[in-house]
Image (cartoon, grey):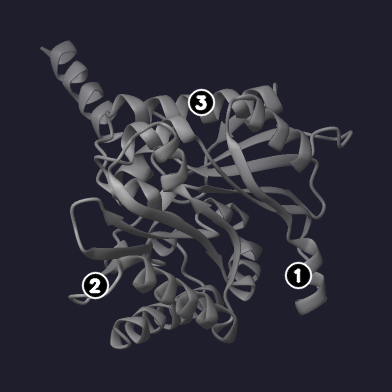
Amino acid sequence: MRSMIKGLLVALLVVTGLTAGEANHIRVFSAENVDGKITPTTIQKAFEKEGFMVEANNDMLAPFKRDFKVVHHKVYNLMVLWDKDTFRKIGVKYPNFALFTPLSMSIYTEKDGTTINVSSMSPAGIAQMTGVPADNADLVNLGKKIEKALKAAMPKGKFITMPYKMVKEEGELVHSVSIEVKKGADWEDTKDDLEMAFEGKLAPNGFVSPAFVDLNYDLDEHDIDAYKFFDAYSICKIPVIYTVSQKHPEAGAVAPCTMYLYMKKDENTIHMAFPTVYKWLSAMYIKDKPSRDVLLDAQKKFETILKELMAGK
């Protein structure tokens, strides 16, 4: 009887994505790197060898020094990447999967440390945010593909246990809006105007976009005719990641975040969504006031941007 109960519990944990050692959705793969031979560049190459498209791998120490003078890490990169095969298999049925297409990761070494670390969102975390079932074979394979790349880049590395556990979310994990294209209007003109207006609001509000991906281009290349367009923007606010990364360098698993816009082939509505900071607060159990303040301020500003875009339509 005990064996049966244990088997049922293990099965439940696998389905929900909470396998042993994965109580947190943000996970960190770590390896000793005393000789410095493992670098953000060698890690990028390992992911590219596994078929990932790396859209950005930015050294954040330069903007941190420029804007704040003091840095807290020896290495701190934000890498943005995605797997075309996985998006083709999942993105048509589950458009919210674009919230992690591209994915974000941080690559970091503490200022006085000798280990190099890579943070990423676990498949269970992606499932929670996107609505893709945690046992979806393609999502599970994506997790395995990420692990394979990490092990190739850092052969003696392993996932480490984080010093906290996730807590209940304080609010919605995804903020979404929809814009109906006006009767008689050209949807392409509406899309172009909307994106131009959106891009124009980023810098005045302190946001930058280190990567842009036309997700529909690859779908078209494979004769998948599901969307009129599907665009993804990586969005980041440097003061946010600087502040949060001091205590939580693994925050690069959710920064930059991805905002998407798409229109289905048989619809006349533009859908937009982005992940909220409540995932940051929950997944990393962020309690310190400076981090909470910059996160909640960024959340408010981004929601205001979308509200202003809605008002203009």
- Residue contact at pointers 2 and 3, CB within 8 angstroms: no
Mark 1: amino acid:
Phe
In the image, 227 versus 129, the foreground residue is 227
- Asked if 133 appears above or below 14 in the picture, the reply is below
Residue positioned 41% across, 31% down in the render: 222
Compared across the picture, whether 92 is left or right of 195 comes to left
**Comparing marks 1 and 2, which lies closer to the viewer?**
2
Quadrant occupied by the C terminus: bottom left
Q: Judge depth for marks 1 and 3 and give the one in front.
A: 3
Q: Write down the quadrant of residue 2 in the picture.
A: top left
Q: Which residue is mark 3?
A: 145
Task: Give the label on residue 64, or none.
Answer: 1
Residue under pointer 2: 181
For the N terminus, which image quadrant?
Answer: top left
In this rendering, the label closer to the viewer, 2 or 3: 2
Q: Label 2 neighbourhood size at 10 Å, few (<14), some (14-19), many (20+)?
A: some
In the rendered image, which quarter is residue 29 located in?
top right
- Kindly report the distance in space between the C-alpha atoms of the residues bearing marks 1 and 3: 31 Å
Instruction: Name the residue: 51% across, 82% down.
Output: 201
Is 137 placed left or right of 287 in the picture?
A: left
Instruction: State the CA–CA distance, disc 1 to disc 2.
Output: 41 Å
From the top left corner, tell me how far across and down residue 34 is, in percent. Answer: 85, 35
Query: What is the three-letter code of the residue carrying label 2?
Result: Val
Which badge, 1 or 3, comes first in the chain's sequence? 1
| Residue 226, horizontal then vertical, whole percent | 27, 43
Residue plotted at (53% across, 30% down): 146
In terms of secondary structure, where does tag 2 sit?
A: loop
